[in-house]
Image (cartoon, rainbow, N blue to C red):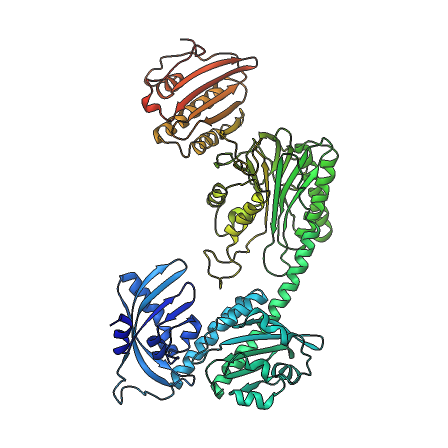
């Protein structure tokens, strides 16, 4: 005998409830026990929920969570009710829960059990008290869900997921008004083409939704016979859906009928006063939610039009380079912000990339952003260097602040900004920064490093602020990302943890050379931060509209690498970082250590990583102590993984070569060359025309090496 036959013989059915997907699978016996036709079925969670007594079903989540925590069976006694709320039978559920992505899964049995003895329960009687308590809980839940919905789509999704106590619609439709005709705003439980016959109807049509809009009164049709008798002209349109009961209710907001809501039921519904009260209350909440969502969408459309009118399009045809950009506004009405990006052709033939953020999320912030963007374009087009462009922009914004404070008493606004002058031919980047997050570079082997740059105060605080420039080179196959802090800090992250989140997205990206690769990366960055569009959608994150987001991506294509040849990756990628440390910036020694550790993030031997960091710290410190110039650090990794070499050069402008000394036990200096001899695979000092370069090398397979090597160009004894 088959297992299914054996279980059926003892009135036991099998069911599987996938909470993450919102689907329930029943065998024929489980379907019979739930009052459905005795045939295997797959139903929505909401449809199955309507078959259980609402009080009993409300306890299931607690039982499941306890079973998951204790790793035991989830067992519960559940009353099965009909459409009138009358108990048909009692079943016992025994299920084994397990956690799945986004929820839990139950797999178990349903078995009919004897009814309670007389006097212990009112079997086969309406559970009015429990039903009303459950109705109140349901209406609170429905009100909360509809109040949180921010768009028409979300309102409809919430309405479709509502599990009404004791009865559950099998199909929903929301009708609107366009002139003298019906429009279908949305529907659930129907196919995409099912709405066609209803779209062209005039409000004078003999159709329940049209009559509801004309009169403002609800229409309840408990049977197909009642429907066909009252509306013979349009009954054939409804008959093909094979429903048994219908409710059409007006959607009224601020005393005006804005549409109609249809709830159709596969099981007969008598529409008792309690059931009508629930439907009427839901219709009122639905009307308010739709009106509110429509107003927010109109405001958001206006805000986006304002923002996009001031937002440029990036130039796609830079020789040897690809650019992608995204702007995502904050949510909520006219809460436009001051984030922006720009791309400016320069008189020299180079390109300027600009990204910035004006303080605030209002129309004034957007207006200041537009003025500041125009000013930056004017200064850049005159041919000024990056530092001069930002200095003039700061003076411009400070002047606006002074006028606003003196004339209108408004608060002072400042702006962060990153201005990058790009030479497409060489990949040279001249960067000036005004209080903005540093750029991040994805190197050709996939490693992501944040490139520290010199910077000044945000624009508009001090009229004559200085903005020192930093020069970097974007190597072939590398991609630079610059963004506003909304991309980094959204979701409760700070600067460091937010960058780590983005690092994983960028490093996982695989360019394929098809011209759309950078666009996909831009989408992935925004999606990783914002998550799905609503908390009603299954996904890893809640909807986040805490701050505007602007992001610019610039990729320098690898020479000779196109479609079918490895995308944007060169055949033998080189990992390199460059950093300068000035005499007045000893705090950047810590940044030098971090840069070297990041470059060596996947190095095989952690002891060698620690040695490299120690030697770099010693070499840069020696330059600051014993010369009067800056230290230039260059770290480069070459070779295949497992047999790589890192070479670190620290250059300075002094011609004096270091000398080996024998420091005493309490000496505070003199150990630099000793450390190189002890820790480096090889090292040396190379004289240059304008100074010298002290260098060392480490080898990933250094365990087989004979020991450190000091070349002839090493320091004097």
Q: Quadrant of the N terminus?
A: bottom left
Compared across the picture, whether 589 is left or right of 262 comes to left
| Percent of width and height locating residue 60 | 34, 71
Determine the residue located farthest toward the top in the rendered image: 717
| Percent of width and height locating residue 221 | 54, 87
Query: Within the image, what quadrant is residue 111 found in?
Result: bottom left
Determine the residue located farthest toward the front in the rendered image: 1
Q: Is residue 674 shown to the viewer in this render?
A: yes
From what the image shows, is residue 3 above or below residue 370? below
| Percent of width and height locating residue 407 | 74, 51
From what the image shows, is residue 84 above or below residue 164? below
Residue at point 58% right, 73% down?
194
Q: Pick the residue in front: 698 or 611.
A: 698
| Percent of width and height locating residue 637 | 46, 27
Residue at point 64% right, 81% down?
210
From what the image shows, is residue 628 above or below residue 100? above
Q: Is residue 402 shown to the viewer in this render?
A: no
Q: Pick the residue in front: 661 or 140.
A: 140
Q: Pick the residue in front: 230 or 288.
A: 230
């Amino acid at each position: 005998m088959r297992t299914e036959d054996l279980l059926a013989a003892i009135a036991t059915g099998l069911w599987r409830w996938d909470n993450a997907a919102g689907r329930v699978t029943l065998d024929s016996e489980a379907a019979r026990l739930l009052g459905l036709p005795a045939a295997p079925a797959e139903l929505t969670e909401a449809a199955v929920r309507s078959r259980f007594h609402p009080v009993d079903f409300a306890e299931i989540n607690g039982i499941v969570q306890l079973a998951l925590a204790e790793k035991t069976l989830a067992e519960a006694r559940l009353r099965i009710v009909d459409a009138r709320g009358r108990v048909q039978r009692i079943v016992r559920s025994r299920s084994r829960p397990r956690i799945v992505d986004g929820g839990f899964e139950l797999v178990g049995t349903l078995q009919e059990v004897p009814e309670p003895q007389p006097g212990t329960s009112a079997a086969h009687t309406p559970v009015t008290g429990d039903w009303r308590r459950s109705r109140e809980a349901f209406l609170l839940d429905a009100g909360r869900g509809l109040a949180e919905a921010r768009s028409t789509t979300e309102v409809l999704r919430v309405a479709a997921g509502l599990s009404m106590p004791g009865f559950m619609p099998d199909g929903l439709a929301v009708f609107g008004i366009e002139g003298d005709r019906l429009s279908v705003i949305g529907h659930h439980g129907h196919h995409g083409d099912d709405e066609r016959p209803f779209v062209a109807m005039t409000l004078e049509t003999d159709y329940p939704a049209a009559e509801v809009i004309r009169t403002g009164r609800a229409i309840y049709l408990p049977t197909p016979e009642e429907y066909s008798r009252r509306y013979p002209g349009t009954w054939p349109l409804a008959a093909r859906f094979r429903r048994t009961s219908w409710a059409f209710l007006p959607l009224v907001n601020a005393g005006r009928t804005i549409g109609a809501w249809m709830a159709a039921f596969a099981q007969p519904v008598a529409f008792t006063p309690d059931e009508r009260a629930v439907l009427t209350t839901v219709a009122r909440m639905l009307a308010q939610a739709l009106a509110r969502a429509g107003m927010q969408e109109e405001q958001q459309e206006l805000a986006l039009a304002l923002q996009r009118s001031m937002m440029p399009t990036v130039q796609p045809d830079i020789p040897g380079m690809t650019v992608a950009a995204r702007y995502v506004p904050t949510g909520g009405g006219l809460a436009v912000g001051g984030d922006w990006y720009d791309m400016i052709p320069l008189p020299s033939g180079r390109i300027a990339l600009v990204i910035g953020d004006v303080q605030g999320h209002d129309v004034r912030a957007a207006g200041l952003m537009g003025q500041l963007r125009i000013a930056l374009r004017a200064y850049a087009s005159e041919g000024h260097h990056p530092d001069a462009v930002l200095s003039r922009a700061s003076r411009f914004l400070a002047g606006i602040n002074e006028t606003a404070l003196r004339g209108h008493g408004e608060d002072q606004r400042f702006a962060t900004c990153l201005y990058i002058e790009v030479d497409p031919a060489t990949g040279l980047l001249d960067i000036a920064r005004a209080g903005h997050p540093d750029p991040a570079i994805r190197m050709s082997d996939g490693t992501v490093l944040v490139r520290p740059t010199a910077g000044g105060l945000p624009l508009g605080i001090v009229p004559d602020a200085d903005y020192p420039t930093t020069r970097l080179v974007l190597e072939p196959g590398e991609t630079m990302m610059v963004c506003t802090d909304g991309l980094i800090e959204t979701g409760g992250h700070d600067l460091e943890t937010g960058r780590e989140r983005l690092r994983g997205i960028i490093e996982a990206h695989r360019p394929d050379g098809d011209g759309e690769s950078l666009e996909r990366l831009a989408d992935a960055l925004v999606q990783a931060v914002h998550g799905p569009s609503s908390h009603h959608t299954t996904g890893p994150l809640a909807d986040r509209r805490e701050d505007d987001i602007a992001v610019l991506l610039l990729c320098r294509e690898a020479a000779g690498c196109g479609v079918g040849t490895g995308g944007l990756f060169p055949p033998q990628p080189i990992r390199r970082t460059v950093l300068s440390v000035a005499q007045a910036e000893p705090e950047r020694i810590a940044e030098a250590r971090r840069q070297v550790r990041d470059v060596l993030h996947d190095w095989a031997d952690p002891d060698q990583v620690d040695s490299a960091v120690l030697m770099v710290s010693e070499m840069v410190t020696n330059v600051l102590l014993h010369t009067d110039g800056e230290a230039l650090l260059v770290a480069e990794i070459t070779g295949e993984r497992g047999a790589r070499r890192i070479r670190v050069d620290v250059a300075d402008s002094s011609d004096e070569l270091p000398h080996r000394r024998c420091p005493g036990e309490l000496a505070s200096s003199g150990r630099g060359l000793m450390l190189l001899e002890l820790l480096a695979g090889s090292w040396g000092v190379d004289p240059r025309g304008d100074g010298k370069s002290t260098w060392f090398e480490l080898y990933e397979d250094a365990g087989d090496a004979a020991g450190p090597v000091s070349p002839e160009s090493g320091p004097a004894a």
